[in-house]
Amino acid sequence: MRSAAPASVYEPPRVHLDHAVAALRDRAGAIANFQQARQLYGDPEDLVRAAIHEIIQLRGLRRSPEALALTRKLMKEFPQIPAASVLKLFDEQPAVPPGPTH
């Protein structure tokens, strides 16, 4: 039988889904949270993972130049980190085109 993680550490999957839904509703707020997380994380792998989420939100807001700049900066700073392989995908994928202007 698997022992449960301490209550202060364990978050049920529903909590993570709620965070994802909230991020879609408030992308600018999510970006600020991911930027703060990058400042606080000491582990480069965690920092890159937070940045990946930030890049997704930037692209979702059609802020592709910022997303690309962050992608390339982190690829240069952390080329050997396993999570950096995901950054390469952002560098290769075309950004979301700007929406129509009315």
Image (cartoon, rainbow, N blue to C red):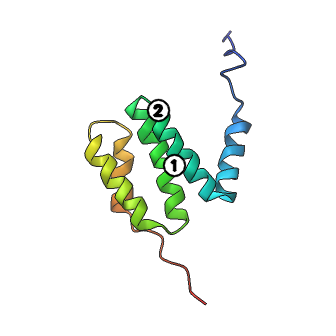
Where is the N terminus found, in terms of image quarters? Answer: top right
Q: Residues within 10 Å of mark 1 (few under 14, many from 20)?
A: some
How many tags in the picture?
2
62, above or below 71, in the image: below
Foreground residue, 45 or 33?
33
Numbered disc 1: secondary structure? helix
Circle on res. 41? 2
Q: Residue 91, how many percent across, how many down?
A: 34, 59
Q: Residue at x 60, y 51 (%)?
A: 30
Q: Residue at x 69, y 15 (%)?
A: 6
- To which residue does mark 1 refer? 53
The amino acid pointed to by label 2 is: Tyr
The amino acid pointed to by label 1 is: His
8, above or below 51, in the image: above
Q: Quadrant of residue 3?
A: top right
Measured Cα–Cα span from mark 2 to mark 1: 14 Å
Where is the C terminus found, in terms of image quarters? Answer: bottom right
Q: Are marks 2 and 1 in contact (CB under 8 Å)?
A: no
38, above or below 87, in the image: above
Circle on res. 62? none
Side (left or right) of 47 relative to 31: left
Side (left or right) of 5 relative to 86: right
Q: Of the residues tagged 2 and 1, which is closer to the observer?
A: 2
Numbered disc 2: secondary structure? loop
Q: Residue at x 66, y 16 (%)?
A: 5
Q: Earlier in the sequence, mark 2 or mark 1?
A: 2
Q: Residue at x 63, y 53 (%)?
A: 29
Q: Residue 65, how many percent across, how many down?
A: 39, 66
Foreground residue, 92 or 58?
58
Q: Residues within 10 Å of mark 2 (few under 14, many from 20)?
A: few
